[in-house]
Image (cartoon, coloured by chain):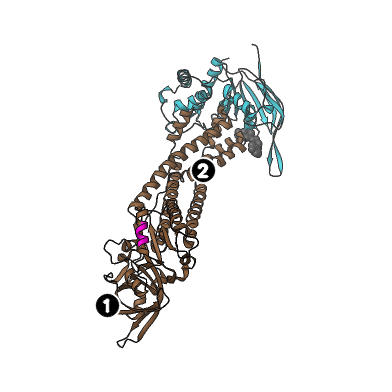
Amino acid sequence: MIRFLFKGLLRDRNRSLLPILVVTAGVTLTVFLHCYVTGILGDMIEFSANYTSGHVKVMTRAYAENKNQLPNDLALIEVNDLESNLQEDYPTMDFVQRINFGGLLDTPDEFGETKKQGIVAGIAVDIISENSKELDRLNIRNSLKRGRLPEKSNEVLVSDEFATKLEVDLGGTVTLITSTMYGGMSIQNFIVSGTIEFGVQMMDRSGMIADISGIQNALDMDNACGELLGFLDMKNYDDIAALNVENTFNEKYTDPNDEFSPVMTRLKNDSIMAGYFDYVDSFVGIIVTIFIMAMSIVLWNTGLIGGLRRYGEIGVRLAIGEEKGHIYRSMIYEALLIGIVGSLLGTLAGLGFSFWLQEVGIDVGDMMKSSKMMMPGVFRANITAPAYYIGFIPGLFSVTLGTMLSGIGIYKRKTASLFKELET
Amino acid sequence: MEQSTLITIDNLVKRFPVGKGEFTALNGINLTINLGEFTGIVGPSGSGKTTLLNIIGSLDNATEGDAVVMGESTSNLSLKSAAKLRRKHLGFIFQTYNLLPVYTVFENVEFPLLLLNMSGSERKKAVMDALEWVGITDKVKSRPAQLSGGECQRVAIARAMVKKPVIVLADEPTANLDAANSHNILKMMVKLNQELKTTFIFATHDDKVIKYLKRKISLEDGKVVKDEFTKVKGE
Ligand SMILES: Nc1ncnc2c1ncn2[C@@H]1O[C@H](COP(=O)(O)OP(=O)(O)OP(=O)(O)O)[C@@H](O)[C@H]1O
Ligand SMILES: [Mg+2]
């Protein structure tokens, strides 16, 4: 009997091939979308990690409490020792010094008087030392619009828009007016070696990137920095690993009675990033749910039509003496089989596409030529564990539900009227 | 010849809900049909022939009264028992053949036997016998779409006969067939009726069928208006 029904299933393409194709297509899209969304949001997180929070970040306790005000007067001191200690404690990680600073940026005329002036939001990173990973991490090379990268500690990059506003040319001088770590006035000249396009509006209006040694010098921050960022040796942020680092560090270095003692927070604890994390989970959840619903409706209709189409067969089977329940169950088994096959194929296809997008990526650089972003120029998918099973939810659920719903039609109809519908 | 009662219909009423009211399709039918009969329910269109056949075949329920088929009261039969009755003892032949298009001739005829848990070799023999009765052994592997209407109906008869049911219910079996095919099929059924003692009950208004009937039950507006036994030539 089972073999008999299976034979029928295989021979009737409307019953096997078509629904399998529908399920496969839907599952492929679900899996792919899941990987795509996870990948893009992962990229956004990675961007934030690279740019502002690291996988972990060390500050003084006092700085951490006021970090939105860029309180460089509360910066970490003796930071070179701290960095090498950290590098020793966590040898696979990479630690870098960063200083975020604000102030006025001024272009002088030939008499040294202010020609143009603007508020600057700057970030100081290690640009010029030979094996620095910061250039890649911040995608600086690709974001360069004009000129070249800084090669000396007094050379800086200014956002292209800002440079135009300040009327400063490549090789021209800008004056940074800000306060030193000890509250004194700092006035320091820098040479603009190039301009950069961040792709983030706020930073494009007033952004500046300088080498950390130059800024340490200007702000009187020798052997000091605002933030010490740590990066785990892995492609995607791993909260468990980061938590482990955070706990062991704070155990060892943080003194609750000393507000200048260093404290570590991990990416997930960073206030902005916490939101992102919830966002990733719920966004993937919402998208996949919407998709499951859409798929279920499509497949339900397939099931419904499939069921209606088979009234003739069902009528004959009933007349021959098969029980309604038996027919109903056999239809659900068929649906399950189709769901499983379709889900398997769809998951494979979806993983295939996602793998391709994970390894190769879509180069959006061309699409966004006008704005060379500080963001990665390539969108990548990210295959995570749920990708292997998420497709089975819509695949099995929808096709089975569809069959059950259309099967109710069989149950509710009088056997004789199945024939009526058959004969007309 | 000893007569044993096969079907007893007692004050059978069937009403269908139509809009807000009801339509009485069968209005107090009383009948007895014996084993081995070759009987037709005849009458104009809409007189209730199909409705009566469906109730005898437990595909539909009576509104009032009862049809007792092989000792089972169809009014009180559970779905399960009704299916069992059909599976074991009833065969159906339809105007539209209703062969399953994805299966071969052999498989279509084999299907009722699968529900009876017969072994493969038993099934094969039974199917080949049935195909031989209807003279279509050369098309075993064909699909219904490759057959003519007459051939399809012969396969449908083989499917109804393969399990050697006690009763075959045939609703307008010749409506889609030409005269020659109709006669062929009727002759075949007469032969099966004689050889296997299968009881045939037709619903028809086709004179070609009526000619072969040994008993004619005439329906009009859901009532039996005439019930006559006829001498068929050759008897
Ligand atoms: N499910 C139903 N709902 C409402 N009315 C029905 C239903 N089935 C049958 N009828 C009505 O009952 C009457 C008898 O129908 P039935 O199909 O038994 O006629 P019939 O004698 O077989 O006719 P024909 O020769 O045209 O096949 C008809 O008037 C029909 O309209
Ligand atoms: Mg009829």
Q: Is residue A30 above or below residue B83?
A: below
Residue B13 in the image: x percent, y percent? 71, 31
* Front one among A137 and B97: A137
Crowdedness near tag 1: few (<14), some (14–19) or many (≥20) residues, C-alpha within 10 Å: some
Crowdedness near tag 2: few (<14), some (14–19) or many (≥20) residues, C-alpha within 10 Å: some
Rendered hue of chain A is brown
Question: Disc 2 or 1, which lies upstream in sequence?
Answer: 1
* Front one among B158 and B102: B102
Q: Amino acid at mark 1?
A: Gly
Residue A251 in the image: x percent, y percent? 46, 55
Q: Are marks 2 and 1 on the same chain?
A: yes
Q: Amino acid at mark 2?
A: Phe
Q: Residue A220: within the magenta?
A: no
User: Quick check: A14 left or right of B59?
Assistant: left
The circle drawn on residue A397 is 2
Residue A229 in the image: x percent, y percent? 39, 61
In this view of the protein, can residue A321 be seen by the observer? yes
Q: Residue A83: within the magenta?
A: yes
In the image, the segment drawn in magenta is A81-86
Q: Secondary structure at mark 1?
A: loop
